[in-house]
């Protein structure tokens, strides 16, 4: 018996990964700006 | 332009020179504070959350992540991408350990220092052998991958590309130390994330996931199967290999020492989340190839092939930059961390002993100044050794080495280190939390785990090696813990001035 990944789950996986990477990039920049303002980059 | 390449060579050289100057300039500027050993090795032990999370993610995004993930997807299907994602579990599990490391060893420098202080000299020797083998294998692999990939992407001759990327990383690590490594890692992480998202979104726009799914269902349904035995085995092997790499390697310990108190666990946790989507976001390009009707001649370059087909030369430029950043962010970390191991665990005891035998004059260089000088010599020597190991290969040999085997020789050679690093997981984890555990027990765990794993590598397959090595080491460690006495004193790990006074 072969279990096939449903199309919806496949789409969710790909769109989810792209969305997560986008949020990661933006979040990282915001975090860096916050660190710079607090003078706590290093 | 050679039709097999994705960019004209002139563009490739231009990008190589431009980014080489950017990284060296940035590294020199950031590294102006790395005059002392503490600055050079652990960036003053005061790195904040943003730079901490970024350096964690960037170091873990190697050229393998962006090049091998699409290959895994093309050959092992959906599970291939997901198997790659499990490597982030190592970062997540290391998050609490990093906080513990930072607390127990506020003046620490290397992972081998922990093994020496916690278990003793025999365990230290075995651990150093594992760490150096792994570190050098990874370093040589990355340099060869750099040469082969720059050649495949833009037709830059193998030796030239390998030399250029290695030279760039050696120069900024040499002058900037950990400040330069962490600072450049931040910029590289942002570039990689943005690059992967841009390419991914444009590919999805051309071939929506539903279309890719329908094509795969019709032509290669096995790639969508949730019961793909080889892929499932690769999933667990990859996860344990990743955990072993992170738990033992000085690349990760040196960052735990560098992060400000209270930052380490958060930085590792956030770094894992930043890394998690990359293998899927980059890997699905491999699955998109059949839907887009793209013929893949070389599985290891399916990512750039799809990007270049869909986005033209813009896509090839983005992929070239992402690959260059991925390579540089790993090579610089390996140079710094392996250099630290050699400087602190081999050169420092020799320097201290020589000073004891022939005390220097009061106006002579301090131990710190001598060590800082030695660290520079070690990094240049490491770079030169790596170059010597990579340069004799001609382009064809290096390409065959990179491509060969069922998944690619690069991966199979790296997985050879799987049982070595897997056998260090249990001794490290137990040693950080339990006061039990003997030197003999830890040596047995690492030696027996490595031996059993290597037997599995040759007799069963590369995808079982880390699994078997880790399992044997865990069993030996459990026996050692049950039989041992809880007599270790944690303060022996604190080598800072405050700790040595108490």
Image (spheres, coloured by chain):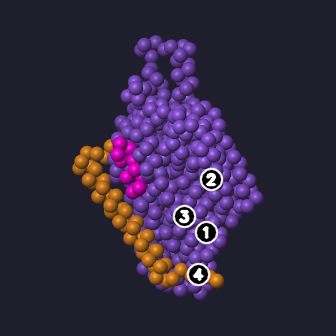
Looking at the rendered structure, which numbered label has been put on residue B232?
1
**Element carrying mark 2:** helix
Query: Magenta: predominant secondary structure element?
Result: helix
Q: What colour denotes chain A?
A: orange
Nearer to us in this view, B266 or A36: B266
Q: Marks 4 and 3, how far apart in space? A: 20 Å
Secondary structure at numbered mark 1: helix
Q: Residue visible at 58% across and 74% down?
A: B77
Front-lying residue, A12 or B382: A12
- Find residue A3 and name its label: 4
The residues colored magenta run B256-271
Cβ–Cβ under 8 Å for marks 4 and 2: no
Q: Which residue is mark 3?
A: B84
Residue wearing tag 2: B470
Q: Chain of mark 2?
A: B
User: Does the stretch in magenta take in B340?
Assistant: no
Categorize mark 4 by other alpha carbons within 10 Å: few (<14), some (14-19), many (20+).
few
A11 to B12, vertically: above or below = below
Residue B71 visible somewhere in the drawing: no
Asked if the residue at tag 1 contacts the one at tag 4, i.e. Cβ–Cβ closer than 8 Å, the answer is: no
Disc 3 from disc 2: Cα separation: 19 Å
| CA–CA distance in space, label 4 to label 2 | 30 Å
Q: Residue at x 74, y 53 (%)?
A: B455
Number of other residues with Cα within 10 Å of mark 3, as a class: few under 14, some 14 to 19, many 20 or more: many
């Amino acid at each position: 018996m072969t279990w096939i990944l449903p199309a919806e789950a496949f789409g969710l996986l790909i769109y989810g990964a792209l969305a997560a990477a986008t949020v990661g990039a933006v979040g990282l920049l915001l975090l860096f700006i916050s660190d710079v303002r607090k003078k706590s980059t290093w | 332009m050679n039709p097999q390449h994705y960019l004209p060579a002139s563009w490739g050289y231009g990008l190589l020179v431009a980014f080489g100057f950017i990284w060296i300039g940035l590294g020199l500027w950031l590294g102006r504070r790395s005059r002392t050993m503490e600055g050079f090795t652990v960036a003053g032990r005061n790195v904040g959350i943003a730079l901490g999370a970024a350096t964690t993610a960037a170091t873990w995004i190697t050229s393998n992540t962006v090049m091998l993930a699409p290959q895994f997807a093309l050959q092992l299907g959906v599970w291939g991408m997901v198997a790659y994602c499990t490597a982030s579990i190592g970062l997540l599990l290391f998050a609490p350990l990093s906080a513990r490391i930072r607390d127990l060893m506020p003046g620490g420098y290397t992972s081998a220092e922990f093994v020496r202080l916690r278990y003793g000299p025999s365990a230290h020797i075995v651990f150093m052998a594992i760490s150096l083998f792994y570190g050098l294998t990874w370093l040589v692999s990355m340099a060869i991958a750099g040469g082969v990939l720059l050649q495949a992407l833009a037709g830059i001759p193998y030796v030239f590309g390998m030399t250029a990327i290695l030279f760039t990383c050696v120069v900024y690590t040499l002058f900037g130390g950990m400040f330069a490594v962490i600072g450049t890692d931040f910029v590289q992480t942002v570039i990689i994330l943005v690059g992967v998202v841009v390419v991914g979104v444009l590919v999805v726009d051309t071939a929506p996931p539903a279309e890719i799914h329908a094509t795969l269902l019709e032509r290669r349904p096995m790639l969508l199967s949730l019961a793909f035995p080889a892929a499932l085995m690769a999933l667990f092997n990859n996860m344990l290999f990743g955990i072993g790499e992170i738990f033992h390697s000085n690349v990760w310990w040196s960052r735990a020492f560098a992060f400000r108190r209270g930052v380490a666990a958060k930085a590792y946790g956030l770094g894992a989340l930043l890394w998690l989507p990359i293998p899927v976001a980059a890997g699905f390009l491999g699955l998109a190839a059949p839907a887009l009707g793209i013929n893949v001649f070389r599985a290891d370059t399916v990512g750039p092939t799809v990007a270049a087909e869909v986005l033209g030369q813009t896509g090839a430029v983005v992929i070239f930059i992402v690959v260059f950043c991925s390579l540089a962010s790993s090579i610089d970390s390996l140079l710094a961390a392996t250099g630290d191991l050699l400087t602190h665990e081999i050169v420092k005891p020799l320097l201290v002993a020589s000073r004891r035998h022939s005390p220097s004059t009061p106006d002579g260089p301090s131990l710190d100044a001598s060590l800082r000088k030695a660290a520079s010599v070690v990094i240049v020597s490491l770079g030169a050794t790596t170059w010597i190991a990579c340069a004799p290969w001609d382009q064809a040999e290096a390409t065959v080495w990179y491509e060969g085997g069922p998944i690619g020789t690069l991966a199979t050679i790296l997985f050879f280190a799987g049982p070595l690093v897997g056998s260090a997981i249990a001794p490290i984890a137990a040693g950080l939390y339990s006061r039990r555990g003997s030197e003999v027990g830890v040596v047995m765990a690492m030696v027996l785990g490595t031996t059993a794993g290597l037997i599995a590598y040759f007799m069963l397959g590369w995808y079982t090696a880390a699994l078997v090595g880790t399992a044997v080491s865990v069993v030996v460690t459990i026996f050692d813990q049950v039989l041992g006495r809880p007599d270790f004193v944690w303060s022996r790990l604190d080598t800072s001035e405050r700790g040595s006074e108490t």
